[in-house]
Image (tube, rainbow, N blue to C red):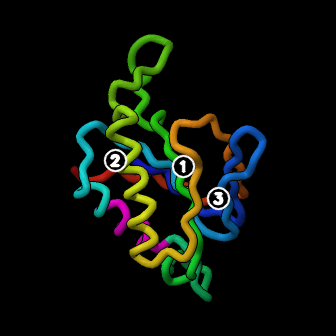
Amino acid sequence: MRVVVQRSKQASVTVAGEVVGEISSGLVVLLGIAPTDTQKQLQWMCDKLINLRIFEDDSGRMNLSLLDVDAECLVVSQFTLYGNCQKGRRPSFVGAARPEVAEPLYEDFCKRLKTMGVRTVATGIFGAMMDVSLINDGPVTLIIDSKD
């Protein structure tokens, strides 16, 4: 499992001209799922995200988590995070899970964030062409791979 996390002041995802998900202050999470990912990687990644100390405290240090600041989260499925560009000029996506594997894990990921205390978990639409807009706060952008 791979995520790109961006701290944002505001973010939204639009499909066919309609806003389908939006947040104010929080995290934009682009989520890529590999064919071998399981609930174990999903749980690890959710725990990592909600406890990652990337929000500033009163001293201006990155010392607070998503839960500490009661921020929101926008999760967007992103199979292209597993694009391999090592050979040729066209990326290979064989490292990304097929939709029948990825979609249930994506949905579970979003549900789990809610059950773990994230106030708002907005989403895009799995498999759709989406326009994602955000105001990156900082900018703070991190890439996290599950440890397995």
| Label 2: which secondary element | loop
In this view, the residue in front, 55 or 118, is 118
Amino acid on which disc 1 is placed: Val
Q: What's under tag 3, amino acid-wise? A: Pro
Q: Amino acid at mark 2?
A: Met
Real-space Cα separation, disc 2 to disc 1, in angstroms: 13 Å
Judging by the rendered image, the residue that carries numbered circle 1 is 76
Disc number lying in front (3 or 1): 1
In front here: 62 or 44? 44
57 vs 89: above or below: below
Circle 1: element type: strand
Q: Which mark is residue 1?
A: 2
Which residue is at a point 40% across and 53% down the rendered structure image?
144
Q: Give the structural element (helix, strand or loop) at label 3.
A: strand
Q: Position of residue 67 (x, y in %)?
A: 49, 79
Q: Is residue 45 magenta?
A: yes
Q: Which residues are magenta?
A: 44-53
